[in-house]
Amino acid sequence: MNDLLTWLGQYSLPVVVLIIAGAALLYFAKMMTEKAIAQQFDRYARVMDLQLQRRSNFEERILIERYTLFREINHKIATIFTNLNRMHGGTKIEGLIRDNDVVPLTEVCDLIASNRYLIPDRFRIVFQKEVELALRFANADQQQQNEIGQTWLALRHEFDGLMVGAFGLDQDCAWTEAVDAQ
């Protein structure tokens, strides 16, 4: 306020009005610029947040698909081993072997190949070892079957370790802790 009175004493009224108008114009320009920058930043932050949310949703879907696929492949291979063991025990299993080919094992190989982008190498290697082991088991005698059975158990243990590592299955979730507390 004192500056305004000093200017009125030194300059004419139109000059003071021009100075005040210029100062007001600069103030409003500064405010508008700050507001525009803040809006752009907020828009950018929302876009980034949406992109991160979409990516997070995508990764969650992939994780669920992987988990389901890995369990399905592992279950199919285990069923094949069980059926081969039953067949070696004398039980007739329809559709298991046709023209020296273990039919369900071919389906598993196709499933692994068709989902190659979902299956990381460390899982693919274990699945391939299990498939090869099942093929050896199908053509093995009793002594070889026992040896293959031990290798099969080691691969199952390796698969379990991979599942725990990849999906954190050994960690308690907040909702399980709440249920356990009740």
Image (cartoon, helix red, strand yellow):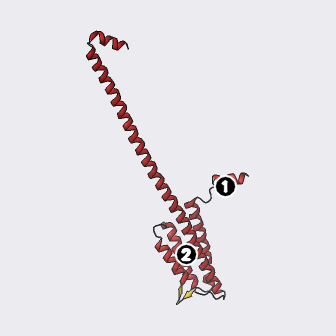
Look at discs 1 and 2 and give the one toward the viewer: 1
- The residue that mark 1 highlights is 176
Q: Amino acid at mark 1?
A: Thr
Depth check, front residue: 141 or 57 = 57
Mark 1–mark 2 Cα distance, whole angstroms, equals 33 Å
* For residue 120, side relative to residue 147 (left or right): left
* Residue linked to disc 2: 130
- Label 1 packing within 10 angstroms: few (<14), some (14-19), many (20+): few
164 is higher (above) or lower (below) than 1: below
Circles 1 and 2, Cβ within 8 Å, touching? The answer is no
Q: Position of residue 15 (x, y in %)?
A: 26, 17
Q: Which of 56/79 is in front? A: 56
Please report the residue visible at 58 percent of the width from the left and 69 percent of the height from the top.
71
User: Where's residue 99, x and y in %?
Assistant: 52, 90
Residue in front for this viewpoint, 2 or 88 = 2
Residue 80 appears in the rendering: yes
Is 178 positioned to the left or the right of 134 in the image?
Answer: right
Q: 82 or 3, which is in the foreground?
A: 3
| Quadrant of the image containing the N terminus | top left
Q: x, y percentage for residue 50? A: 45, 51
